[in-house]
């Protein structure tokens, strides 16, 4: 019989470094996570359907608006370039929500977060791929809007000048608005985690709430009263306009307005750059909360 092994003679295995799995690896690198999320996003038919719908809505609504106003004596086709933005942003908004909620609605988050234990890189990768696809869709939607005004401009023998009178700023602001709206949808989807409630919250925040606030402000004013003097805005109306300006819709209005124009009466005149910062805040804050929730709470 052989002598029993002593504690000193039994080989021991060094503990795995902190933060690593049992295989001693930290999991996939961030570029690999981005590649995986891009593969998921581009393999879904819904991504292409939403992208196509966004481009078509932008072009068709712009075409209709330009043709409806082409009979006006002072018709400028560039004034119709943003006519389809309000409805065209629904597509990017829904796209972002679907990306943000996709892992949770299908149950694949268990596999994904097992492969990427730190979890937050997955959310960051989703932000990168959503922003990239949304930017491409936004550029195509803006191009569709430009094409949409061409028939009306041609009917009046007006040459469409896209290089003057602040038009490049309007086109760039529209592109940024559509891309930012997709990231807002992603942030809300990642925070809520359920597609239907997230879409409802997103649509109410972006489209419904500004209209409700404006109507509420109008109810509180006397329609028979004389128009206030320049700069003399009732306090209630100024407060409502300030809140609307600080919503995503108000940020979008600031991003897409032509140079020389101002925002809502009584509201702070933030300009396009201020509007961009407001929209960025609406994206960053929910993303940070969603990331913190991923790190500190167990997943159901």
Image (cartoon, rainbow, N blue to C red):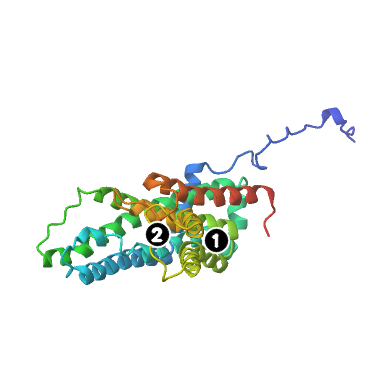
Q: Which residue is nearer to you in this view: 140 or 64?
A: 64
Q: Which residue is nearer to you in this view: 268 or 252?
A: 268
Q: In the rendered view, does 1 fall on the left or right side of 200? A: right
Q: In the rendered view, does 152 fall on the left or right side of 54? A: left
Please name the residue that numbered disc 1 is placed on: 101
Q: Position of residue 148 (x, y in %)?
A: 23, 65
Question: Which residue does the image show at 48% across and 60% down from the upper left?
Answer: 237
10 Å crowding of disc 2: few (<14), some (14-19), many (20+) = few
Local SS, label 2: loop
Which comes sooner in the sequence, label 2 or label 1? 1
Q: Position of residue 1 (x, y in %)?
A: 90, 36
Local SS, label 1: helix
Query: Can the viewer see residue 58?
Result: yes
Question: Which residue does the image show at 83% across and 29% down from the upper left?
Answer: 9
**What's the CA distance linking mark 2 and mark 1?**
47 Å
Callout 2 touching callout 1 (CB < 8 Å): no
Q: In the rendered view, does 187 fall on the left or right side of 143? A: right
Please name the residue that numbered disc 2 is placed on: 228
Q: Residue furthest front?
A: 226
Q: Which residue is nearer to you in this view: 121 or 262?
A: 262
């Amino acid at each position: 019989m052989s002598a029993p092994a002593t504690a000193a003679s039994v080989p021991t295995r060094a503990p795995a470094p902190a933060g690593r799995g049992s295989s001693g690896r930290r999991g996939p690198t961030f570029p690999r996570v981005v590649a995986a999320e891009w593969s998921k996003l581009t393999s879904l038919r819904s991504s292409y359907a939403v992208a196509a719908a966004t481009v078509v809505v932008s072009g068709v609504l712009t075409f209709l608006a330009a043709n409806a106003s082409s009979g006006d004596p002072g018709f400028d086709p560039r004034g119709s370039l943003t006519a389809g933005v309000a409805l065209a942003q629904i597509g990017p908004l829904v796209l972002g929500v679907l990306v943000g909620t996709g892992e949770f609605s299908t149950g694949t988050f268990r596999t994904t977060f097992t492969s990427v234990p730190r979890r937050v890189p997955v959310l960051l990768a989703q932000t990168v791929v959503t922003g990239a696809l949304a930017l491409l869709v936004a550029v195509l939607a803006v191009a569709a809007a430009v094409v949409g005004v061409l028939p009306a401009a041609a009917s009046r023998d007006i040459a469409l000048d896209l290089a003057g009178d602040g038009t490049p700023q309007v086109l760039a602001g529209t592109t940024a608005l559509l891309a930012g709206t997709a990231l807002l949808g992603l942030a809300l989807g990642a925070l809520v985690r359920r597609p239907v409630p997230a879409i409802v919250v997103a649509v109410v925040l972006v489209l419904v709430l500004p209209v409700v606030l404006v109507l509420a402000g109008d109810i509180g004013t006397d329609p028979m009263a004389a128009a206030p003097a320049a700069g003399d805005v009732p306090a209630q109306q100024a407060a409502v306009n300030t809140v609307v300006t600080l919503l995503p819709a108000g940020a979008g209005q600031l991003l897409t307005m032509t140079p020389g124009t101002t925002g809502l009466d009584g509201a702070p005149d933030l300009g396009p750059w201020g509007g961009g910062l407001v929209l960025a805040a609406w994206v960053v804050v929910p993303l940070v909360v969603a990331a913190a929730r991923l790190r500190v709470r167990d997943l159901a």
